[in-house]
Amino acid sequence: MSTVSGRELLGIVARERKAFERLTVLEQSLLAVDELARREMEARARDTRRLWDALDNVSDPAQAPEGWDDVAPQLEEFANQMRDAVNEPHEGKRRNEATWKITKIHWERSRYVYELYYKKKAITRELYDWLLQEKYADASLIAKWRKPGFEYLCSLMAIDKRNTNFGTTAICRVPLHLRKAGAAQPAVSTGCISCSSQECGRLGGPIWWDSPRPADLIGWAKAGCPTAEKPGKKRKAQEEGEEAELEARAAALRRGVNAGLRAAEADALEAAAAAFRGSADKAPPLRMHDGDEEQKEGNEDGNDEPNEAEQG
């Protein structure tokens, strides 16, 4: 019987240990592969469930109430515009401008449905409710339009005081005739210059950053918002809600950060609220200009970012 030396025995043990370690590593690798396969199958199952849930939530035109075929082409056009706005490149735009066009299209689509039902009486209540349910229009925004003073509200963001530096509404809610000269910049959050009822009523909707409009908006508003068809409207009294809104804005400026630096602006707002300015005097020339041209000029002057504090 042959004997095994201690050195040979140690070599055998070392080889067996290495073989065992290789088997252990292989087993762990197989377990890892199984775990990856299991996770992948679970992920695919989740994706499949999400897909079916999405398909279940897609509105079926076949189930739409009567009259859908008449409004579908325009709503599809709005959907295409929204898709283009979302995919539009952001190069050369200011920080908040990327969402302005989306906000505007959202307003136009909701306004289309609103006017079909409330103004033109062109669709049934059943179709109107179905369009709101399927998110073809913003029910909350439409509800605001039906309240005095909010007939042309550009967006719910404009009245959400949590979105502003001083806890006030957006600058577009301050009527143009109560603003200081030159304060006709769009609100940072929405791209709306003004959605005050009288001013928007003359132009048919909010005055957006790219809307054709009088060159001197402040002077035009103080003259009563004249148009080619209608003379300037004489203001009999302070429009409902404007004075309180201006006073609240001034108070917020006095309480906010850098209140001392904003004192002059607060004084101006309080003075505007106390003494209603604006008359139906001789209107300035109604020279219209394209909002895009003003935007380009601002970029050329190096004014790439609106003063967010002033926009409210």
Image (cartoon, grey):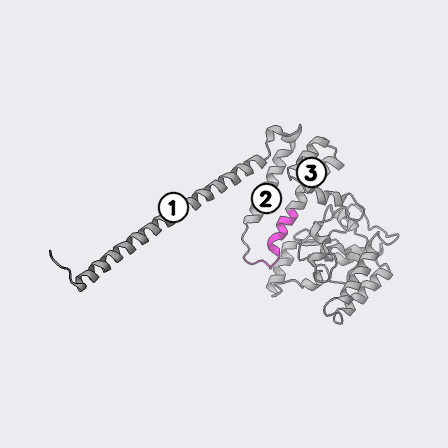
Quarter of the figure with residue 263: bottom right
Q: Nearer the viewer, residue 140 or 108?
A: 140
Residue ID at (58%, 58%): 93
**Secondary structure at numbered mark 1:** helix
Q: Amino acid at mark 3?
A: Val
Which residue lies under the disc numbered 3?
Answer: 113
Q: Is residue 238 magenta?
A: no
Q: Nearer the viewer, residue 42 or 185?
A: 42
1 or 3: mark nearer the eye: 1
**Which range is magenta?**
91-104
1 or 2: mark nearer the eye: 1
* Mark before the other along the chain sequence, 1 or 3: 1
Q: Is residue 284 visible?
A: no
Q: Amino acid at mark 2?
A: Gln
Which residue lies under the disc numbered 1?
Answer: 34
Image: 205 above or below 221 = above
Q: Where residue 110 appears, x then y in whole percent?
A: 68, 42
Q: Which of the image's four quarters has the N terminus? A: bottom left
**Secondary structure at numbered mark 2:** helix
Image: 6 above or below 203 = below
Which residue lies under the disc numbered 2?
Answer: 81
* Mark before the other along the chain sequence, 1 or 2: 1
Q: Nearer the viewer, residue 305 or 34?
A: 34
**Secondary structure at numbered mark 3:** helix
Q: Are marks 1 and 3 in contact (CB under 8 Å)?
A: no
Is 292 displayed left or right of 183 in the figure? left
Q: Are marks 3 and 2 in contact (CB under 8 Å)?
A: no
